[in-house]
Image (cartoon, grey):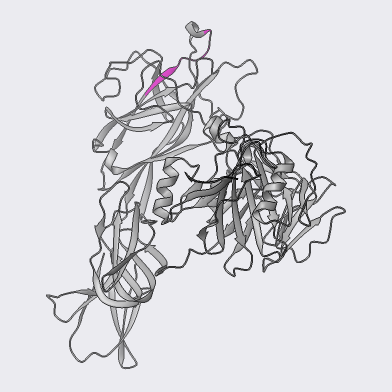
Amino acid sequence: MRCMLYIYKLFLPSQFRHHITQFGMAFVLLFVKITGLAGTVVGPWTPLYKGIDYSVSTNVPGSGDFSNLQVAHAFRVDLKDPDIRLFTTPRIDNYVAGDREVGGLTVSDFLRTNGLQIAINANFFDAGSYYLPAGTPMDVYGLQVCQGVEVSAQGTSSHAYTMSFATNNQAGFFTNWPAKNIEGVFTAVSGNTPLVVGGKNVILRTTTERDPRTGFGLSQDRRYLYLLGIDGRQSGYSTGATDYETAQWLILLGAYDGINMDGGGSTTLVMEDSTKVPIRLNQSSAVADSGRERTVGSHFGVYARPLPGFINDVIALPDDTTAKITWTTEAPSTSEVEYWLTGGVSTSSGLISSPTTNHTVHLSGLTPGTSYYFRAASSVDTQRYISSTFRFITTNYVVTNQIFDITNSWKYSTASQDGSAWTTQSYDDSTWGGPGPGLLWVDVRATGPNASVNPKNTQMPADPGNNGYPFVTYYFRSSFSLDRIAPGSSLQFSGYIDDGAVLYLNGNEIYRLRMPASAGNKTLASSYPCEGDASCLDEFTVPNSMLQNLVVGNNTIAAEVHNYNLRSADITFGVSMSLIEPLSRTAKLNIQQSNGGIILSWNESGFILEAAETLQGPWSAVEGANGGSLSLKVLPSSHFYRLRK
């Protein structure tokens, strides 16, 4: 017998490995291949969060229980950890049992929307099709309970194999038919087939259908919950598993009981990185085929706390131009924050050398409505500790004024404008069609125009040279006037665009929607909205940095709209536009005597209270000045106070 040790990089795209580095962890897949034996070994469990470990494994094809190459990803959740909380897809608004039960989401969006740390697809569901818009009403099969609320009842004998959890995460595994009393059940999900019962694989080896799989399992002592995803339908990487093989993987992981959940292209495992971005861990066959994650109707997620270290409890409290960063450390140490914009050079808050275990650093001079990355740093003697990378978004106190609505009128043309100055103010569009109010549209499908696309105000011509289908590209121009522009203003657009578009302001490109980097008259859009029709809103904001040629007085807005393919039967355009202006704020500092001391108070958030012994300074931030007030004892000497942004 020969024993060979292999070390592989994790089966993940390069961008995920970057995020893992930001998360402060390095993953390596380590397994032993023993020739001559059924040598499949579970990859090492790597801690992701407190109470959550992650493993990725592969098998030895053609040996033991696995005849084909498979890659298995798994979460192990410690149900005894007091900080672990479980969560499933909740009820949709205007809930209707057995019909309108949940709003569909991708697993990544489910994690992001609910602030979870890990998530995976769960129960089977009725969707009709995949890649549906977020929030599409769906019906879940079998029992599902979210935070004590029954989302889906057990209606038939199918999909009756259930895992349930009490408020303290005490777990159970049972056949829910006839339907059981669910009193005391706080969380529940169901599958269609039991895979492992009492530590035994209950599936016949003769099953041959091999697909991506999702399976849930519980350890015998009910301490651990296993969430398994096996990739498939990808030759040379992972072909998928049968029910029997899925059961064998659950047993290898440590499951004593287990069930089959909704797999196939829905199989998706996601984790939250330290900047709150969802990262797909497995290689979904749906994403591999289409580049898009499926919209599914049932999910299972977990809330957990970060792994403990020297630096803990990092919290950011942003305002519009300021942010307060707090954290704790295991021992008294210095305080510093490094922060930066995406792709930018980091800036230091400056070192606070006084050692403490409860740290507070104030950042100022930030840009409203902007995403910042940051990390906390603390030093003890010569040892410097750095936290994971985190992210916050500054608030933006603004006023929004609509310039025109979605029925705004546009001049339009179907003639190629390649090489012309059609986006500039001086261009003569007198020979163009219109002006016609939005939506401007073409729809030549045999069944008639899509009734869900509204308002249909201006019908444009189709292309007789393209068998009566729409032209690949339509061009639009309109104008608007401003009597003032506040510094830091931005433009907000909302409308219906089918399929892709490029927008221009006074001759300069300002936004590109579902379009490749360069576009001519025959360039096709790179994607399409919703399921291919302009039935859901496109909303986007063009920041101040892209609006340097926005002027007081008359402005020209232009757009070119491109179809997704030559035989697409429809094209649609219409947007509203609003000017977003920063709202100037001032704060008043009040002083009041009380019980032999004084109370300082102010009426606006985001201001830092500073103190000095002389008017000339030096000024320093006053710690403990929270909630817009601070109580002080009478001081032996004069002190000066001020508010700073």
Q: Which of these two is toward me, 569 or 485? A: 569
Q: Which of these two is toward me, 187 or 308? A: 308
Q: Is residue 146 above or below residue 431?
A: below
- Residue 185, percent from left and from top: 74, 63
Main SS, magenta region, reads loop
Q: Is residue 265 left or right of residue 499?
A: right
Q: Is residue 330 left or right of residue 78?
A: left
- Kindly tell me whether residue 587 is visible in this rendering: no
Q: Quadrant of the C terminus?
A: bottom left
Q: Quadrant of residue 114?
A: bottom right
Q: Is residue 48 left or right of residue 511?
A: right
- Residue 513, percent from left and from top: 42, 31
- Residue 211, percent from left and from top: 67, 36
Q: Quadrant of the N terminus?
A: top right
Q: Quadrant of residue 422?
A: top left
Q: Is residue 257 magenta?
A: no
> Which stretch appears magenta?
467-476
Q: Is residue 346 above or below residue 141?
A: below
Q: Residue furthest left?
A: 616
- Kindly tell me whether residue 336 is visible in this rendering: yes
- Residue 546, percent from left and from top: 28, 38
For the point 35% across and 66% down, which residue is it?
A: 325
Q: Which of these two is toward me, 70 or 309? A: 70
For the point 51% across and 59% down, which residue is it?
A: 47
For the point 24% across and 74% down, which residue is it?
A: 353
Q: Is residue 344 above or below residue 419?
A: below
Q: Is residue 276 above or below residue 358?
A: above
For the point 54% across and 33% down, which residue is it?
A: 288
Q: Residue furthest front?
A: 1
